[in-house]
Image (cartoon, helix red, strand yellow):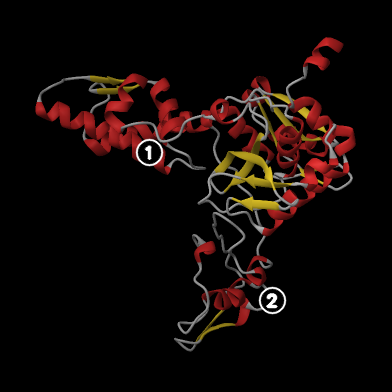
Amino acid sequence: MLDEVDKLGASGFHGDPSSALLEVLDPEQNSTFRDNYLAVPFDLSSVMFICTANVLDTIPGPLRDRMEVIQLPGYTAQEKLQIARRYLVARQLAATGLKPEQCEISDEALSMIIGDYTREAGVRNLEREIGKAFRNVAVRIAEGSVQQVKIGPDDLASILGPRQFEAEVAMRSGVPGVATGLAWTPVGGDILFVEAARMPGSGKLILTGQLGEVMKESAQAALSLVKARSGQLGIAPESLEKADIHVHVPAGATPKDGPSAGVAMFVALASLLTHRAVRSDVAMTGEISLRGLVLPIGGVKEKVLAAMRAGISTVMLPARNRRDLEDIPAEAREKIQFVWIEEVDEALAAALVPTLADVAAT
């Protein structure tokens, strides 16, 4: 077992560990592997190597080519709740010296810890927070102030402190120029806000938020697509020539990259320039082309679960990702309405708040 191979250090004067692993993991060479330090040959051809990693990007390409990658998605909130109830609670009770009758924790409290105090693909921090809560109870019992405690959602603030994560979609969206996107991260999916602003200028595009090269190109493609469809959207061309467009993707300290924010960027720009707000209950993901096509993306399950955690009721996905629907948990499929889009026009129709003229026409 080679754990955390994505943390291999870069080559330097200490040597390059990835180069040694190349020979070890290559089935064409590892039958004659020779340890240069011990000067002893080893036959590793019958050894099965299992490597673990959080991300693939930092694993050197030649080393990654010698591996068969098996993707393991993170746990859902319901799966974490069952793991906590069946295993973590009992383990932490034993670790703190408490008996089950001395301390109980409700499912509602566990769900609150999962959603408001941790943000991870696994359950390591969840177990840590449960242990912290039980240690608080153990101290109170040892001091004689209580004999038995049942932890509910209302008790967590005094035990664990203020919640670390909050759903803030409604506060940050619902205004022209702001769209809610969905992103994949190593710890699962997350909500991504795309903010656009216009100011007097000379037609420049300003990008902030530590965006990678691919994401910058997505923003440029989104703006070009809006300009190409300015007549259809009712945008005066001269208003674009005499204005600078600023696109910002919070949080600014977190690096971001990938093409899947293309739809959200296009909708945010169209919303800004048409003065129509984006619905606060809608989130979207998808790559766009200059022809206005919406292209498939990855990480659908994680992104949909992030939308469900944030209270999103409608998720727009590329039509070609319909095949991923079976990977989405039944709970999410029941709570969320999916809009399958092939072109950006469909995204605008589903995401933008209707105008008075649209309402009158219906």
Which residue lies under the disc numbered 2?
28
Residue 280 location, x and y as percent? 63, 25
In the picture, measured across the screen, residue 93 lies left or right of residue 235, that is: left
Which numbered disc, 1 or 2, marks the residue that appears first in the sequence? 2
Residue 177 location, x and y as percent? 67, 35
Tag in front: 1 or 2: 1
Give the amino acid type for the residue marked by disc 1 in the picture: Glu
* Vertical arrangement, residue 45 with respect to residue 213, above or below: below
Circle 1: is it few (<14), some (14-19), or many (20+) Cα within 10 Å? many
Q: Please say whether residue 56 is visible from this viewpoint.
A: yes
How far is the residue under mark 1 from the one under mark 2?
43 Å
Circle 2: is it few (<14), some (14-19), or many (20+) Cα within 10 Å? few
Residue at image coords 74%, 44%: 262
User: Foreground residue, 112 or 161?
Assistant: 161
Task: Give the image quarter of residue 141.
Answer: top left
Residue 277 location, x and y as percent? 69, 27
Residue ranking furthest to the left: 144
User: Foreground residue, 19 or 272?
Assistant: 272
In the picture, measured across the screen, residue 87 lies left or right of residue 59, that is: left
Which residue lies under the disc numbered 1?
127
User: Foreground residue, 337 or 148?
Assistant: 337
Residue 242 location, x and y as percent? 76, 46
* Vertical arrangement, residue 247 with respect to residue 314, above or below: below
Q: Element under label 2? A: loop
Q: Element under label 1? A: helix
Which mark is on residue 317? Answer: none
* Vertical arrangement, residue 196 with respect to residue 150, above or below: below
In the picture, measured across the screen, residue 203 lies left or right of residue 47, that is: right
Residue at image coords 86%, 36%: 343
Give the amino acid type for the residue marked by disc 2 in the picture: Glu
Residue at image coords 34%, 19%: 154
In the picture, measured across the screen, residue 168 lies left or right of residue 112, that is: right
